[in-house]
Image: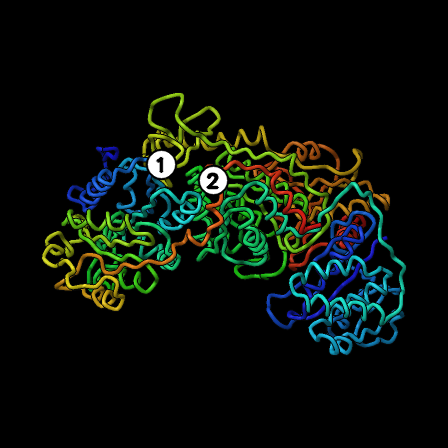
Amino acid sequence: MMFKEREITSWCPGCGNFPLRKTLKESFNKMNLSYKDVVMFTGIGQAAKMPHFLKINGYNGLHGRAIPPAVGMRIVNPEIKVIVESGDGCSYGEGGNHFLHNMRRNLDIVHLAHNNQIYGLTKGQASPTSGTDMRTDVQPEGVTAQPLNPLRIALSSGATFVARSFVGDREHLAKMIEKAFKHRGYALVDVLQPCVSFNKINTYKWYSERVKKLDNHDKNDIEAAFSKAGIWGDEIPIGVFYEDEREIFRDHFPWLDNDEIISNREIDPSNMEDLLTEFQ
Amino acid sequence: MDYNILIGGEAGQGLKTTAYLLGKTIFRNKYHIFTTKDYMSRVRGGHNFIKIRFSDEEVKGPKDDLDLIMALNEETIENHLGDLKNEGILLAEREVEDIKNSVLVRAKEIAKEINSKGVNSVFIGAFLQTIGFDLIEAKKVIDEYFAGDKNKVEDNLLLLEKGYKSCERIENMEMNEFDESEERLYLDGNQAVGLGAASAGVSFYAAYPMSPSTGILNYLATHQKRLSIAVEQAEDELGAINMALGAAYGGGRAMVGTSGGGFALMNEGLGMSGVGEIPLVIAEVQRPGPATGLPTRTSQGDLNFVINSSQGEFPMMVIAPKDQEDAFYQTFRAHNLAEKYQIPVIILSDQFLADSSSDIKKINLDKLEVKRNLYFNSEENEDEYKRYKLTADGISPRAYPGSLENDTILVDSHEHNEYGRVTEDIELRNEMINKRENKLNKLIDEDLKEAEYYGEKDIDYLLIGWGSTYGPILEATNKLINNGIKVGFLSFNDIWPLPKTKLKNWAEKDVKKIVIENNAKSQFSRLIGSELQIKIKNKILKYSGRPFSGDEIYERIMDEVVNDV
């Protein structure tokens, strides 16, 4: 039982981050991971403060830039498990380009996107996933842009594991997290969670009444997955939409594995003599 | 001797290959050489030229007047004939009246019979005959360059000989003889940075292609297998710098490369390196801005931007290599300093340095030492690991995930406590700012390189320059001295933090100071003014996007300062 939650957080009572943190901790312990086995990259937002409130190797970086440092980490250490964990604003808005291109790379990470359809840390503005007509201080006439569909984007960008869960169903969430960890490749879990302070529409009750586990669904069928990922309204499907196998990012650097992993290497410039010949 | 040739043509005519083959041949004939590229930002057409200057003495910059023009197109004749010396040679596909040494090279005609793509090999052959070289080295160079393609090798060798035989000898140069024991390398500034990074054990290089920095990316990508490292073309510069930071957090040596526009996008990541104390080396290869500017041309216009970049206050270092040899050593040094102090170190290069090739003393790799400053198990105490432990010199033990048996490593972009956890505590905030600043104080004491001075003690004029203008300014200095002007040259390599001692000493003397820079606002004198309260009135500035030549600096100093009474 290595992983522990810290006592003090800056989250509001009832925040969806609490059940997610608890589930993560339990999953790590259940998987028998030790500190050396896992590292978490986050951006900015309330969700992104996770490594401050759960003892774990952590890199709390910049807003929107939670994914890129995971690329570098994957290169220097292929053995460690890498989680990217950040909110909908960080993952889908500010960091949208990195989201797209790292799914193309099939970067071997678990990406937990806390999706509460609102900006919490900046006190309640629309996020990329906010519903049309949601009114906020900044969008007093209502949100006009169409909400972004992270699952469809993931499916069309090359993610090889695409799932959705809900913090109100911790058992389901734990299952999704464990499956995502077992997956080799980009595993996106879009985690629905309420923001109790700022999102008065998408509440625990609102989600609970709508989420429905996927059944009769072939997760290897990308067309079916795309179709199911379009369902949002009175019914919101949760579960694994799609799963596939293809070469991961790190597989394209096979020469890295002929050597000691990068972080443990000794460097000796006198071994570089052969590099000089092309300039002679 | 000091011989200057120009090869001109349009984009797509194989100018770069021709210049490479010629440059390498001259280098193998044991001459000192300096090659500059002047090209437009386009894939086809336009007017591009490459100048190759060679000599039996070291050459460190370009020259304006020409001894020979190799015109691959008509425009070259029109544009450059005015710079040809009276006795100069013109190699072209037509003869030009009034030019004493106009040599007709029937390149297309000759090539057509063998391989119409080998036109330039005819020209190279004609050139070698004209100036008196034999074909031995040129043949080897062609053989190496087209290695693996037997037909190309054969065709080009044949065309080389045909070109050689097609014209008459005018000059009588032979293979130069310099000390055999002094082995040399011929490379450009981007390759030198790449080689420096490779020798320093860089394990991850990320970049978004941007002229004129792409050569570094090309070099490292070509060698990544051999080096057992990873090179990744990022989706954008934000991705590149943050990828590199992740690699450094993970225990690797990381580097990114870009030009001014890309560096603007990297600014927030630079601050992350500063506050997170994550070592990072950044090559900023300047081109003229603002915005897109002149993509393939040169500038020193990013100086003030770079030293002031990113919000907030944090330690960083900026080094401006002075030439190709220095670009190697400074990149190597940058990696050691970035890890010693856990700071970002910027190599501030420019297109002139990056795209120019010269011969340098062979690098002695055995003398180089990599110093990593990493921390492994917490032997000395059982307490929780503190990534940002407050220490006397500000440097905290740097562990990476996996290097500690039973503990975690947390880095943070917020202000943080010693464990890396977010804090807003007043005392801690002050302590952390001071801790980071202390690292810079230590760097100034232990590692900052003072400016180098060239010249006599008793002078009337002090020339001041930084980075890549070193070669041309040095040439101008020598020319001034030879013409009886009492002048010295102070050359800056480390530019941030600014080394102050030598400049302060000179400021107290009755010497006219002249700053020479490739920018319009004289950013370096602004820096000297703000750091040392020294006002410099005389400025030789050039901001056309073209590099200085030594002759040009000499003349401008004579006109604008010495004779301007």
Residue at screen point 71% across, 43% down: B362
Residue A16 screen position, x and y as percent: 18, 47
Can you tell which mark lies on residue B386? none
Residue B107 screen position, x and y as percent: 77, 74
Give amino acid for label 2: Glu
Same chain for the residues under marks 2 and 1 in the image:
no
Snapshot quadrant of residue A8: top left
Q: Against B93, is B538 above or below?
A: above
Q: Is residue A201 left or right of residue B487?
A: left
Q: Against B81, is B138 above or below?
A: above
Report in which chain the residue with disc 2 lies: A
Other-residue count near label 2 (Cα within 10 Å), few / some / many at <14 / 14–19 / ≥20: few
Q: Residue lying furthest top in this view? A: B380
Other-residue count near label 1 (Cα within 10 Å), few / some / many at <14 / 14–19 / ≥20: many
Q: Is residue A206 left or right of residue B109?
A: left
Report in which chain the residue with disc 1 lies: B
Residue at screen point 43% across, 29% down: B376
Q: Disc 2 to disc 1, how far (Cα)?
A: 24 Å
Provide the residue designation for mark 2: A260
